[in-house]
Amino acid sequence: MRTLLVGLRVTDLDRSTVFYQALGYTVVGQVPETAFGTLTMLQLPDDPFVTVELVHDPSRPIRADGGLNHLAIKVEDLHATIATLAANGIEADPADPTADPDEPLVSHLRDPDGYLIELVQWPEGHSDGITEDDFTSDQRRDNGKR
């Protein structure tokens, strides 16, 4: 099994599509008039699969208490990503280094509907995602078994 995608309800489909394209997503297709509304499928360049679905139905407004905490996106170069976003009129927090050089750089921003997005640049040699190794003891990590 694997998680297929996250569906995000959006107020203005065009505005949200432009925002997510500035983050690096590509629109790969659209499914009109479903029970949820119009579905716009997004994929990142290095991912073979759709991972985000923009869900638009003007008759169903977005509620502030929708339950989604945040969407995390891996980037190769956080500083370059922040600069690209700024060039597209999108403001992100400055890159925030963690205390340990073996931990990621992170930044946060909000999409047009207020969803929190976390941008993550893994340290050199880290896998592309979070694994069990990220939750092991400091001793195991210090022994190079990461």
Image (cartoon, helix red, strand yellow):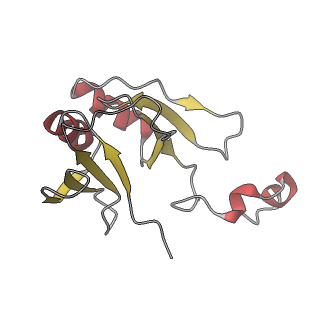
Residue pictured at 20% horizontal, 37% vertical = 59
Q: Residue 56's x, y, as percent?
A: 21, 44
Residue drawn at point x = 71 percent, y = 33 percent: 99
**Residue appearing at x 42%, y 43% in the figure:** 77
At horizontal 19% and vertical 58% (from top left) the residue drawn is 34
> For residue 105, which quarter of the picture?
top right
Total marks in image: 0
Q: From the image, which quarter does the C terminus lie in?
A: bottom right
Looking at the image, which is closer to me, 129 or 104? 129
88 vs 128: above or below: above
Q: Position of residue 88 (x, y in %)?
A: 21, 28
Front-most of 97 and 32?
32
In the depicted structure, whether residue 123 falls above or below residue 83:
below
Horizontal side of residue 30 vs 10, given as left or right:
left
Residue 76 as seen in the image, left or right of residue 89: right
In the rendered image, residue 38, in percent from the top left (x then y), is placed at 17, 51
User: Residue 144's spot in the image, x, y percent?
Assistant: 76, 62
Residue found at the far right of this picture: 139
